């Protein structure tokens, strides 16, 4: 690749998405600093990078300030699965808000470009379908998901205030459900949960009647979108949706996982968690137009790769 070698900080770099991002950036020859407190991430995700001369691992909690010299920051630190982010909701808010302030302060001081991993959750249980970036969302401020949703919304606010007030060079991406190898096998997210259940012969737990929908993006596509956004024009800073517009009901996903794993598992129905969004699908018009980006891996192909990973690791 033809580009300048940069010093890049990835917060949450030992997590699912962060570790894949570190892989790509190390491979491109950049100096990568991976910062993580290992709350939901794991050293195993990045252990293959530890011997690389252009990779450095730091155990640090983003709620505390840190002083580093970097050119770019990808701010991914935050537990992403409902089980993890609801485990200590106050901490989730702190990580989102104080973490964003600490990273934006760092970006301001050292004049680094900074990208925020925001989320489709900022649309809440959307009244507009599919979701476009100019939709303001329908979010409960006081429910079990609020620590994450409102934390991420406040982080977006901070990014735009640091841009307007301090001219920080920002990027904001709203990531829709992404899956793939290195998802935590027990963090309760639907793709990993169904695959682990199918491979270990447990019942497949569909919440509600399974008619709620999600749009699932394979991790490689998403990482490609993040890097394009960081490297894109300075006058396109987002927010921009990144996700796969293919929309599937949770019940359809369960059927696909059973078929692809050739599993004997039965589907069982469990109560729908509170405030679980009923439908979700990204409008990716902006990403197509400004980043020339769209996903390439369809759900069947992505599921097969993910199943292969879990078969090896379980
Ligand atoms: P993940 O839980 O695997 O990774 C998050 C990482 O952040 C973990 O390694 C965790 O240990 C670390 N972390 C958490 N709190 C921290 C703190 N206070 N200080 C330092 N490190 C901390 O989740 P992921 O799926 O890789 O998500 C990465 C980012 O992308 C998150 O910000 C998430 O909100 C966002 N996102 C992900 C998805 C998705 O579907 N995977 C969708 C929307 C948004
Ligand atoms: N879900 C499910 N069974 C599970 C885990 C999740 O039916 O074992 C459902 C969940 O209720 C939601 C969807 O799958 O409707 C996606 O859940 P996930 O936690 O992966 O992501 P999010 O709700 O944050 O989009």
Image (tube, rainbow, N blue to C red):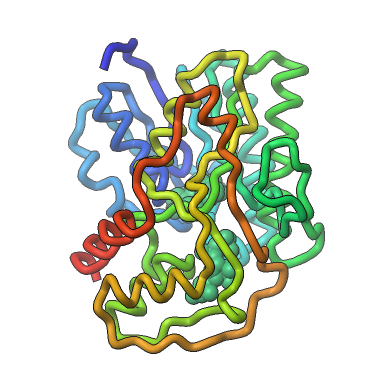
Residue at 36 percent across and 41 percent down: it is 296
Q: Is residue 296 left or right of residue 76?
A: left
Please determine whether, in this image, residue 129 is positioned above or below residue 49. below
Quarter containing the C terminus: bottom left
Residue 237 location (% of width, % of height):
61, 23
Quadrant in which residue 41 is drawn: bottom left
- In depth, the one of 32 and 242 nearer the eye is 242
The answer to whether residue 83 shows anywhere in this view is no
Quarter containing the N terminus: top left
Residue at 37 percent across and 17 percent down: it is 6
Residue 129 location (% of width, % of height):
69, 51
Residue 288 location (% of width, % of height):
51, 29
Q: Is residue 66 left or right of residue 126?
A: left
- In depth, the one of 266 and 171 nearer the eye is 266
Residue 95 location (% of width, % of height):
62, 47
Please determine whether, in this image, residue 21 is positioned above or below residue 314. above
Residue at 27 percent across and 24 percent down: it is 28
Q: Is residue 27 left or right of residue 134?
A: left
Residue at 60 percent across and 42 percent down: it is 283
The answer to whether residue 116 shows anywhere in this view is yes
Quadrant in which residue 261 is drawn: bottom left
Count the labels in the image.
0
For this orientation, the residue located farthest to the right is 141
- In depth, the one of 99 and 194 nearer the eye is 194
């Amino acid at each position: 690749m033809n580009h300048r070698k940069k010093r890049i900080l990835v917060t949450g770099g030992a997590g699912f998405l962060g570790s894949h991002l570190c892989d790509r950036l190390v491979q491109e020859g950049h100096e990568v600093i991976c910062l993580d407190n290992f709350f939901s991430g794991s050293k195993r995700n990045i252990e293959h990078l530890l011997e690389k001369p252009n990779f450095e691992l730091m155990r640090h909690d983003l709620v505390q300030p840190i002083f580093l010299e970097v050119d770019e920051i990808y701010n991914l630190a935050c537990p992403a699965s409902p089980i993890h982010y609801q485990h200590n909701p106050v901490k989730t808010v702190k990580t989102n808000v104080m973490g964003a302030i600490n990273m934006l302060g760092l970006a301001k001081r050292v004049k680094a470009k900074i990208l925020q991993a925001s989320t489709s959750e900022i649309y809440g249980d959307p009244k507009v379908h599919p979701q476009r970036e100019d939709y303001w969302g329908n979010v409960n401020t006081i429910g079990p998901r609020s620590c994450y949703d409102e934390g991420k919304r406040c982080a977006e606010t901070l990014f735009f205030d640091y841009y307007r007030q301090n001219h920080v060079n920002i990027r904001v991406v709203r990531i829709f459900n992404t899956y793939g190898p290195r998802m935590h096998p027990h963090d309760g997210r639907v793709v990993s949960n169904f695959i682990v259940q199918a491979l270990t012969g447990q019942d497949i737990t569909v919440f509600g009647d399974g008619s709620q929908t999600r749009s699932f993006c394979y991790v490689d596509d998403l990482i490609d979108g993040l890097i394009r956004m960081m490297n894109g024009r300075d006058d396109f800073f987002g927010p921009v949706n990144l996700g796969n517009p293919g929309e599937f009901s949770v019940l359809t996903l369960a059927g696909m996982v059973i078929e692809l794993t050739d599993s004997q598992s039965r589907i069982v129905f469990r109560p729908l968690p509170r405030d679980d969004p009923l439908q979700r699908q990204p409008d990716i018009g902006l990403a197509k137009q400004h980043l020339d980006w769209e996903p390439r891996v369809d759900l069947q192909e992505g599921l097969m790769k993910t199943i292969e990973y879990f078969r090896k690791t379980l």
